[in-house]
Image (tube, rainbow, N blue to C red):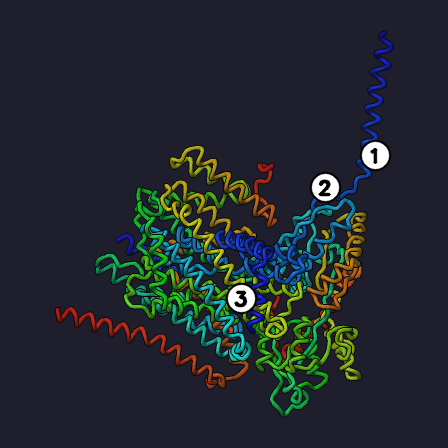
Amino acid sequence: MLEAALEGLAGVVQPEAMAFMALGVLIGSLVGFLPGIGGPSTLAIMLPFVMTMKDPLLVIALIVGMDAVGNTASAFTSILISVPGSSGSQATILDGYPMAKKGEAARALSASFVASLLGGFFGAFVLFASLPVLRPVVLAFSSPEFFILTLWGVSMVGILSGNAPIKGLLAGILGVLIGTVGLDTKSGIERYAFDVSYLWEGIELVLVALGLFGIPEVIDLASRKTSIAKAEEFGRGYLEGILDVFRHWWLLIRTSVIGAWIGFLPGLGSSVADWFAYAHAVQTEKNRENFGKGDIRGVIASEGANNAKEGGDYIPTLAFGIPGGTSTALILTAFVAVGINPGPDMLTSQLNLTFAVIWTLVIANILATALCMLFSRPIARMCFLPFYAIVPPIVAFIFIGAFAANFHSYDLTALMIFSLLGFFMRRYGWPRPPLLLGVVLGEKMELYLWLSYTRYGLEWLRRPMVMALMVLLIASVVYPIVAGRKEKRAAEASVAGA
Amino acid sequence: MARGVERILFTSFIGLVVLGALFVAKDWPIRASIVILLLGSIGVVLVLAQLVLDFKALRGAGPNPEPPTFEVAALEHQGRWGSLEIWAWLWGLFAAIHLIGFPIALPLFVLLYVRLYGGRWITACILASGTWGFLYGVFDQVLHVPWPEPWLRFLVF
Amino acid sequence: MRRKILIFLFSLLFCGFFIAAAGQLFAAEHPYYEGKTIRIIVSSSPGGGTDTSARLVSRFMSKYIPGNPKTIVQNMPGGGGTIANNYFASEVKPDGLTLMQDSSSGIGNFVRGGPTIKYDPRKFKVIGGVARPGSLVMIRNDARPRLMDSSAKPVVVGDTDGIRTWVAMTVWGAEYLGWNLRWIYGYPGSRELALAIRQGEIDMWATQNAKLVKDLQREGVVQILATEEDRRREDFADVPTFVELLGSKRPSGLAWQGYLGWAGAPELDKFLVAPEGTPDPLMKLLREAFSKVMKDPEVDKEGDKFFGEGWRPHPGEKIEAVIREHIAIPKEALDFITKMRQKYGLPVGEKKS
């Protein structure tokens, strides 16, 4: 094992490989920063060039380098302008943007980059540590277990509704309804498509996110003719953010684990990683009143998770040749073309290549963080630009990002509809995160329930893993309630005592 | 007061959407509709409960309800028109994209907005050309995005 | 003096005409595609089989088309291919500069019909296509004994939507060979199905991904029952074709037409088309270029990497004929398919009025 590790490292730090990795990191960061140009499109474009390369190490350096760091740079737009740069940085908006408005953009940015870096390390580490138990663990999770996991997501809806549970639940239900639009594979019916072929494949999540979170904030800025932040001194926050991450190291580890696992398990899809991590933070941390108003822990939780999930994502890809999503599917194609054979070989005869992947994840994250830190000062200054210089580029950004979903003019129509929805939801006090969760989880929940039932009848309830997960789920719901009550009692006692 | 009425209207709108979804789903085979019917029914009950709360808030005329836990309070909009102004711009952009095409409408929007709200010509030009450069360079040349045909084709050379 | 000037002017004029004429002649020599760009529209999003075929072809076409035009690939996903097909049928000029890479789902959607279908694939002119090797049906080793034993628990077949072409094999196997099966469907994709068969959540599955099948076989998870194709595959020489399996129990008439209607033609997979009305000389040029591309040894290797060995190119004329045949399946055969699906609890799809 050790020689393979060293061999992998040696391969990756050669000058040629490092050059390719730097290129990959650059492209990946740009792609993460700009909405709409997603990983899949870019990878698809790179594919022809990659196919002509012969050396697997170079391919790994370039492609893994590119793929692993998209989530680091996407924090820029989430924090500064409330526009999710990629599906991984959505939850970052909830606390990142308020921090920017308070003038703490630098703190939020540096915290998010360091959290991403360490989270990425952790994902790589999880990949490494689980090499021996990879296959049995993946095989232990089938439809019933995935269903319970989606229920965990449902509990998040409750948490993220905060003080408006009814509206939050309704938002979640609305989200599920939106998620059902499109072809339902288990019945062959087009649901809610009303004979419009654009809707057959469903509504893209990015359109919902951009419309719900991006446009309403822009409208705020434009209506008040104000810049994003007023306070002038923000330079200090830089160091503060880095320290914050270390102050909350235990939170970072927990959320990285969550992120790595969600990336690992093929059932849930990676867009939920940062939401789950965020909700977990809310559930388990003390003094939660500040969440959603600019609490650094929200940023740390979300960003730590979304880089960790990249590492986790590679596990089913390498161990089974089963891609975790579109990007890993393309990566798989690239690997196969160069002679990297995912499957049992990766753990035996091609172990050095597996290590090359792990090392690339580590080094690429370092490069990306350095790059982002370098640019964060100048880019963060945009918070203080006058609104007329900010609003048009943001709007342009959002429109381009929306259009890149399907390159269809209906994308823009969908964007406008969700913008209206987001605007009114905000105005009338309806929480928006549950809606997003509903879109992401609703279909999966339905699917796994259906598969569990048709395959196992009601037997699946008795599976050991299912029961274990249920216990964990109930614990995770009950714990914050109990802890909250204890806190309140302690607070009351101290008030009474004073 | 007006805001209170607006809230009720919005809640009712959501209720109508849920009812509409239920109505469409009832004709489907059970395996496609079961989850929707279940959640939709719960949704209807919740909407009614929320409507009750909204009416009480209206009648009670208590302090403005606090914003949802995870949101920063929506800022009050300035001026007579509040947010209608920016909405007009957004819908205008939307229409322009359909009429004269993405690559022209977007930079034009940037240019006009910056200029009309007090920016200098140089700022406007830089931002607009940056937008155009991005659209052309990345989307057209690298990604070969199929731009939809603008409706006023003849205006676009 | 005047005469000299006149002669001089005339000669100048004459030279001018001569040069112009010569220029025209040269222009006529320039290949049509020189300096031009061919746009290939792909009916799916980046990364899938259709997209990969398109990019493979686009990389090499330029080499073999006189004039060496640039080629670019544009994705136009949506509607399972409908959006691209509709656009291609109505908006694209037949000047040989815009082509479309489509897949058999474009044909399938047309046959299903409905108000959103605004194209007719029979009118497209096919340049050529690639057909990936047919699906291989596999069954878990521990489920094999139950296949022919109707008193045992049924063997579980898993699929995404229950209407894949290989499912026809399982249904006809149940009907005519007495296979003891039950179907569950709704899985999001091959990734989940591959996992499910490893876990034993499903017992039977089929895929075109030869590598995956080999891996599963090697690990002792499955054995391979049959191949969808009409002749044995070189890389799986001991696997019988489904027709061989049926042997004497193979039905004829409507029952067999129904099978063919569902299983589809093996040639129809990913193909490149030009719009209706593209002039014959251009079609000839493009078809020749396509067949040269397919003979390029590098393309052969790349194709093997992407599609697995055993993929085959097919000429445009053949695919056009297959499309017409496939669409012309008689209504009674389609009804037979529906009946069979209903019998075994598979989705019948929307009812079209």
| C-alpha gap between disc 1 and disc 2 | 18 Å
The disc labelled 1 sits on which kind of residue?
Leu
Nearer to the camera, C40 or C125: C40
Q: Are marks 2 and 3 in contact (CB under 8 Å)?
A: no
Q: Is residue B116 above or below residue A105?
A: above
Q: Nearer the viewer, mark 2 or mark 3?
A: 3
In the image, are marks 2 and 3 on the same chain? Answer: no
- Any mark on residue C25, and which? 1
Q: Are marks 1 and 2 in contact (CB under 8 Å)?
A: no
Would you say C269 lies left or right of A473 here?
right
Where is mark 3, residue-wise? A358
Chain identity of mark 3 = A
Q: Residues within 10 Å of mark 1 (few under 14, many from 20)?
A: few
Q: Is residue A14 above or below residue C39?
A: below
Quadrant where the image shows the C terminus of chain B: top right
The disc labelled 3 sits on which kind of residue?
Ile
Residue at image position (53%, 40%) is B104
**Residue at the farthest left position:** A498
Percent x, y of residue C138: 67, 79
Where is mark 2, residue-wise? C35
Q: Which element is circle 3 on?
A: helix
Residue at image position (33%, 52%) is A237
**Residue at the farthest bottom position:** C151
Would you say A96 lies left or right of A348 here?
left
